[in-house]
Amino acid sequence: MTNLERPERLQIMLSPEELAALDDWRFAHRMPTRAAAIRELLKRGMAVAANEPEHRRRRSHDYSVVERRTAERRTNGDAGN
C-alpha cells in the first residue's frame, strides 16, 4: 500500500439514497474504497466545473448527489421552483 500524506480529514453527511448512489458508482468503477471513489468523483467534478460558466448563488441544500422527489420538494416548500 502506498503511503500517501493525507493529514486532513473531511466528514460529510449523506442521505441513504446518496450513499447508495455513491456505492453503486464505486462498485461499477471497481474503486477499492468509498474514500477513493469520493476523491475520483471530486477530481472529475472539479475538471468539469473548471470549464463551466459561474453558477448563480446557491445554498447548501441546493446540492445533492441524487435528485429529490417532487413530493419532498413540496414538503420543503420548493413546489414548482
Image (tube, rainbow, N blue to C red):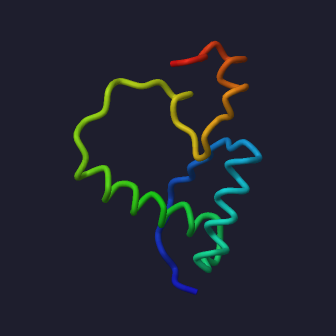
Apparent side of residue 57 relative to residue 80 in the rendered image (left or right):
left
Dividing the picture into quarters, in which one does residue 64 lie?
top right
Apparent side of residue 41 relative to residue 44 in the rendered image (left or right):
right
Pick the front one: 6 or 65 = 65
Q: Residue at x 31, y 59 (%)?
A: 47
Furthest-top residue in view?
77
Pick the front one: 6 or 36 = 36
Residue 33 in the image, given as x and y percentages of width and height: 65, 71
Apparent side of residue 32 relative to residue 38 in the rendered image (left or right):
right
Q: Quadrant of the N terminus?
A: bottom right
Apparent side of residue 38 relative to residue 45 in the rendered image (left or right):
right
Furthest-bottom residue in view?
1
Vertical relation: 24 (above or below) 75: below
Q: Residue at x 48, y 75 (%)?
A: 4
Vertical relation: 55 (above or below) 59: below
Residue 46 in the image, given as x and y percentages of width and height: 35, 54
Q: Residue at x 64, y 13 (%)?
A: 77
Vertical relation: 25 (above or below) 50: below
Q: Residue at x 68, y 65 (%)?
A: 24
Vertical relation: 47 (above or below) 71: below
